[in-house]
Amino acid sequence: SAAEKGGYDWFMLKEIAEQPQAVADTLLGRHSADGRLQLDEMRLSDSELRDVDRIIIVACGTAAYAGLVAKYAIEHWTRIPCEVELASEFRYRDPIIDRSTLVVSISQSGETMDTLMAVRYARQQKARVLSICNTNGSTIPRESDAVIYTHAGPEIAVASTKGFLAQIVACYLLALYLAQVKGTKYGDEISDIIADIQQIPAAVQRMLDDGDQMRKLAADLAGSRSILFLGRHAGYPVALEGALKLKELAYIHAEGFAAGELKHGPIALIEEGLPVFVVVPPKGRDQLQEKTVSSIQEIRARGARTIVLAEDGDEDVVPYADHLVRLPKVPTLLQPLVAVVPLQIFASEFASVLGHDVDQPRNLAKSVTVE
Ligand code: G6P
């Protein structure tokens, strides 16, 4: 009913709007004023965690993209090598895992069969398994050694939104906790990083308040049969997620690419009028912003219609952006949490304009309990 949807036309729109709360609630009560993290359901001792020399994230769909985002933060803050693998592939390739491998499963529902089977396999191989999950008491956390619950609240729409943001935040809490236990240099900066993450709910709220721009654009582009998404670094999984949302909801061809990979193939796809979203990294020492701006120049010179997501004050992108979406200034590793929001709004509106059921896309299920 309309009341259940909190006045929104679709659960997905309600859940998109709940994202500031989902992020705040997932942080709540997990750190003290002196910057120490406490994760109550961790259940693995500090000495067990100090033994971890490798992390493998297993997940499906949007949760796997949350894992891809998290990989950047986990390796940066902990210096522990981290791989991300689709749960459905994991156990079939005879993966090398042992007691010092931490397998991290991510699942909103906690019931996805592919992910559950990966968890069972990892435990048989004696790895320790920590699960990030949004559903209390579901099967995956019950079968894991430890759990970090995301506190996004129930997610009804098939396409995951607030679950995704909460999963990234939970992965970041895990990464910072490992940094604290291992005593890496970032262990001392935990309170600063947490303070940055605490700014995210307001930053996400701004993206929601600016949502009309995306709704207009979606109505404008609703005739498109194909849309591309580009990103770099932590923005690359955001591009993948933006494309996935559009496939799921609008049933059109959409693909995400790493911007640096453009010249190795995807640039051949660019033709007059093709809409291409580009997530531009914040300016930093690594030149990623500059390199992404030249990718935008390349595709625009070939006729692409560019929709550029760039932080406040980035004037370099202005001459090459047919549509410019402003993002609040946040640290590079936190940018995915704000940049994905306009892409979610775009996909839901695009599907609405086409007359599709936004909450229950054809052929999909909220939780896939078969392999
Ligand atoms: C299904 C849903 C996706 C979701 C994936 C993983 O395929 O349609 O939206 O991302 O499952 O779900 P989970 O509950 O494990 O996060």
Image (spheres, rainbow, N blue to C red):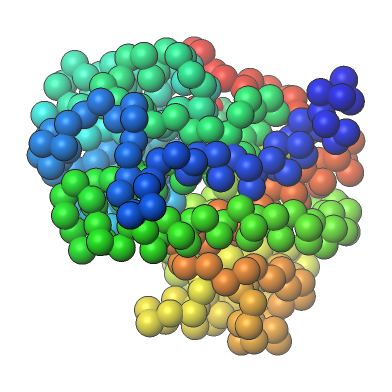
Which quarter shows the N terminus? top right
Res. 279 in view: yes
Which residue: 76% across, 30% down?
Answer: 11
Q: Considering the image in quadrants, where does the C terminus appear?
A: top left
Residue 252 higher or lower than 233, as above or below:
above
- The x, y position of residue 119, in whole percent, is 31, 21
Q: Nearer the viewer, residue 187 or 302?
A: 187
Residue in view at x 73 percent, y 44 percent: 17
Front residue of this view, candidates 51 and 297: 51
Query: Would you identify the image quadrant in which residue 315 lies?
Result: bottom right
Where is residue 83 shown, x and y percent of the image?
Answer: 29, 45
Residue 2 screen position, x and y as percent: 89, 25
Report the number of discs.
0
Q: Residue at x 55, y 39 (%)?
A: 25
Closest to the observer, 193 or 219: 193
* Quarter of the image where ligand 1 sits: top right
Residue pictured at 63% horizontal, 60% vertical: 203
The correct choice, above or below, for 36 with respect to 285 in the image is: above
Q: Is residue 155 left or right of residue 280?
A: right
Residue 159 position within the rendered picture, expressed as x and y whole percent measured from the top left: 65, 33
Which quadrant of the figure has residue 361? top right
Asked if residue 332 lies left or right of residue 209, the reply is: left
Front residue of this view, candidates 2 and 69: 2
Inspect this view and state whether residue 301 appears.
no
Is 143 left, or right, of 231 in this rendering? left
